[in-house]
Amino acid sequence: KGALQMSNADVIITFDADLQHEAQDVHRLVKPIMEGKADAVIGSRFLSKEDLEMMPLTKVVGNYFLTGLTNFLSSSKITDSQSGLRALSRKAAGKLNIVSDKYAVSSEIIHELEGHRLKVVEIPIKAIYDSRSATKGTNIKSGIHIFFTMLAKKIGLMDKYAR
């Protein structure tokens, strides 16, 4: 929060460094926030059939599982909880209390946005799958970590440790 308060940013972008996202998608993420239609925008790789067909099957299955878990525990209706491309309004970013690490951050952001009843929308984004990004992303071990992190957040354990 401290760094945000010192900046004049109206929109904060999170962009994973796994070389999977296109920089030009950032402009489309910012638009709903600047138009007052959203507090946060999640880029979804699951809203475009073409991009979904390019995703390796193991990533599709894993992401469906983690997204279902995230939606269940946070009462959200997101299609891509593990997206590494998000935009947050100043208001939304200022309300987040992120205490997890690694890939669990993606699900925790959604949990926080829903918990504060902020307006979240998704837009389709393009994903790049090549040899550099094939080994990146969540696996079974990180999926288990995300599950337990989200469960702890849901029952209030994460908030106790954050204080």
Image: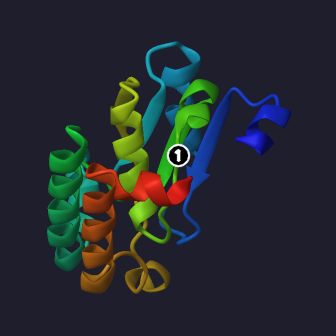
Q: Residue at x 34, y 54 (%)?
A: 153
Question: Is residue 126 in view from this perspective?
Answer: no
- Image point 37% across, 30% down: which residue? 120
**Mark 1 is on which residue type?**
Asn
Residue 130 picture location, percent across and down: 42, 79
The residue labelled by disc 1 is 97
Q: Is residue 37 left or right of residue 72?
A: right
Classify 84 as above or below 141: above
State which quarter of the image contains the N terminus.
top right
Pointer 1: residues within 10 angstroms few (<14), some, or many (20+)?
A: some
Farthest-out residue, right? 6
Question: Which residue is situated farthest in the top direction here?
Answer: 36
**Residue lying at 27% horizontally and 50% vertically, measured from the top left:** 154
Q: At which x and y percent is residue 57?
A: 17, 75
Q: Nearer the viewer, residue 140 or 114?
A: 114
In the picture, measured across the screen, residue 88 lies left or right of residue 137, that is right
Question: In the rendering, at what x and y percent does residue 18 appear?
Answer: 53, 72
Residue 115 is situated, as x and y percent measured from the top left of the image, at: 35, 34
Quadrant of the rendered structure where residue 67 is?
Answer: bottom left
Count of numbered labels shown in the rendering = 1
Q: Residue at x 27, y 74 (%)?
A: 143
Q: How is the image coloured?
A: rainbow
Label 1: which secondary element: loop
The reply to whether residue 52 is in sight is yes
